[in-house]
Image (cartoon, rainbow, N blue to C red):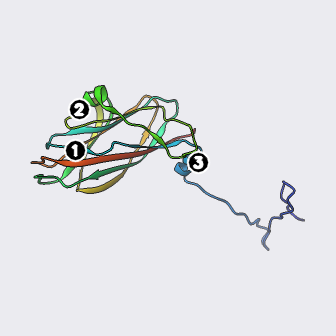
Amino acid sequence: MKVEDGKGSGFFAEVDGKHRLKTFSTVLAESQQATRDGNSYTMFTGVINLTSADLSNLFYIKNTGDESFILDIINIKVGKSTNGVGDFQTVATFNPTAGTLISGGSTVVAVNNNFESANILDAVVLSGSEGSTITDGFGATDLLMDEGVQERPGGILPKNTSFSLGIHPPTGNTSVNISISIAVYLVGA
């Protein structure tokens, strides 16, 4: 018996001596499939200069669409601090509802990672500046980091939930450049 290609192209499947059908498959990570489908996005804050050692909330995203999305990669680039002594801290807050970042932040464009796709991310995405604040929210976490590039995994952001990321430069800081990029993809779209 021969197992023939169902499209009539004349190809046959191979069966080994133990009656196992030999197959070839392609496996894609969920994020790769989302990119193929036009459902993955990257956002960039650009370079933000912080001129104090005070906490500044620099990135905010709120899911306003119907599909949940994964905060896939959070990439934080930290330059050399002028006069800063000690570590930087990152502060992640879930579901913040107010503050100067939310009321007056700059709009960040979510770039579709599939450059042929016209899909857009249903989200409010904002970048902050020196001294930008957020209030309310929960689960604030402080993580120490050094100068350089830090890459962190994110989490899932269901409909109508939000996430904020702040940077607390080291004591004595008078100037440091920070940039943040975050990649997300839709779940089940």
Residue 184 in the image: above or below residue 96? below
- The image shows residue 154 at horizontal and vertical percentages of 39, 46
How busy is the neighbourhood of tag 2: few (under 14 within 10 Å), some, or many (20 plus)? many
Name the secondary structure under disc 1: strand
User: Of the numbered discs in the image, which one, if any, rests on residue 133?
Assistant: 2
- In the displayed structure image, the side of residue 74 where residue 171 appears, left or right: left
How busy is the neighbourhood of tag 1: few (under 14 within 10 Å), some, or many (20 plus)? some
- The image shows residue 15 at horizontal and vertical percentages of 80, 68
Residue linked to disc 3 = 36
Say if mark 3 contacts mark 2, CB within 8 Å. no
Nearest to N terminus: mark 1 or mark 3: 3
Name the secondary structure under disc 3: helix
Q: Residue 10's image quarter?
A: bottom right
Using the numbered discs, state the Cα–Cα distance from disc 2 to disc 1 in whole angstroms: 16 Å
Report the residue at 80% width, 68% height from top: 14
- In the displayed structure image, the side of residue 38 where residue 85 appears, left or right: left
Q: Residue 58's image quarter?
A: top left
Residue 19 in the image: above or below residue 135? below
Name the secondary structure under disc 2: loop
Q: Residue furthest right?
A: 1
The one of 90 and 21 positioned closer to us in this rendering: 90
The one of 13 and 182 positioned closer to us in this rendering: 182
Using the numbered discs, state the Cα–Cα distance from disc 3 to disc 2 in whole angstroms: 36 Å
